[in-house]
Image: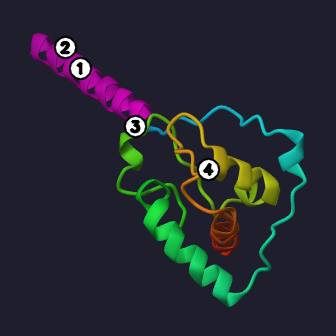
C-alpha cells in the first residue's frame, strides 16, 4: 500500500512538473527593445486620420499583417505560434503609447521575424496602416 502511494505521488509530481514546463514554454517571449533612430521618433503621421485612411489601412493590414498580429491586433494570428517572439498586442496602452514615427520605422524597416516593408509598401500606405492600427486601441 505504501509503495503504491509512493508511486502515485511520484507520478503526480511528474505530471505537474511536465504541465508547468509546457505552460512556461508556451508563454510568448517578448522581443528586445527597438532602437529607433532619432529622425524617426518625432515623425508625425503624414496621412490625416479619416474613415477612408482607416479603411485603406485595414485592407493593407489584413493582407500584410494579420497572419502574425491577428485580425484585431492582439498578436494571435495564424502564424503567431510559429514565431520565436510574441508579435505584440496593438490594442495595449504600451503599444499605443509609442510615437507615430516609432511605429512607422518598425513597420518600414522590420527586424528579426518582422519583415521589412521598405520598397514593398509605399510610405503613404504604411501611414494608412498605422491609422488603422491606432483604431485598435482598447
- Per the image, the residue denoted by label 3 is 26
Q: Position of residue 111 (x, y in %)?
A: 59, 37
Q: Between tags 2 and 3, which lies in front?
A: 3
- Residue count near mark 4 (Cα–Cα under 10 Å), binned few <14, some 14–19, many ≥20: some
- The image quadrant where one finds the N terminus is top left
Q: 54 or 46: which is nearer to us? A: 46
The magenta stretch spans which residues?
A: 1-26
- Residue count near mark 3 (Cα–Cα under 10 Å), binned few <14, some 14–19, many ≥20: few
Q: Between tags 1 and 3, which lies in front?
A: 3
In primary-sequence order, the first of circles 3 and 4 is: 3
Q: With respect to residue 108, does 27 lie above or below?
A: above
Q: Position of residue 77 (x, y in %)?
A: 41, 57
Q: Kindly give the residue lying farthest to the top in the view shown.
A: 3
In primary-sequence order, the first of circles 2 and 4 is: 2
Task: Tell me the distance, in whole angstroms, between the alpha carbons under discs 2 and 1.
Answer: 5 Å
Q: Between tags 3 and 4, which lies in front?
A: 4
Query: Can residue 56 be seen by looking at this rendering?
Result: yes
Amino acid at each position: 500500500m505504501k509503495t503504491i502511494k509512493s508511486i502515485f505521488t511520484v507520478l503526480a509530481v511528474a505530471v505537474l512538473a511536465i504541465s508547468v514546463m509546457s505552460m512556461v514554454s508556451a508563454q510568448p517571449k517578448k522581443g528586445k527593445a527597438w532602437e529607433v533612430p532619432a529622425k524617426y521618433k518625432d515623425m508625425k503621421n503624414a496621412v490625416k486620420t479619416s474613415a477612408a485612411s482607416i479603411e485603406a489601412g485595414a485592407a493593407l493590414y489584413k493582407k500584410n499583417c494579420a497572419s502574425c498580429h491577428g485580425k484585431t491586433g492582439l498578436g494571435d494570428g495564424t502564424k503567431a505560434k510559429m514565431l520565436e517572439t510574441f508579435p505584440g498586442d496593438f490594442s495595449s496602452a504600451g503599444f499605443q503609447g509609442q510615437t507615430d514615427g516609432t511605429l512607422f520605422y518598425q513597420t518600414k524597416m522590420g527586424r528579426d521575424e518582422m519583415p521589412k516593408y521598405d520598397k514593398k509598401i509605399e510610405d503613404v500606405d504604411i501611414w494608412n496602416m498605422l491609422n488603422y492600427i491606432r483604431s485598435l486601441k482598447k
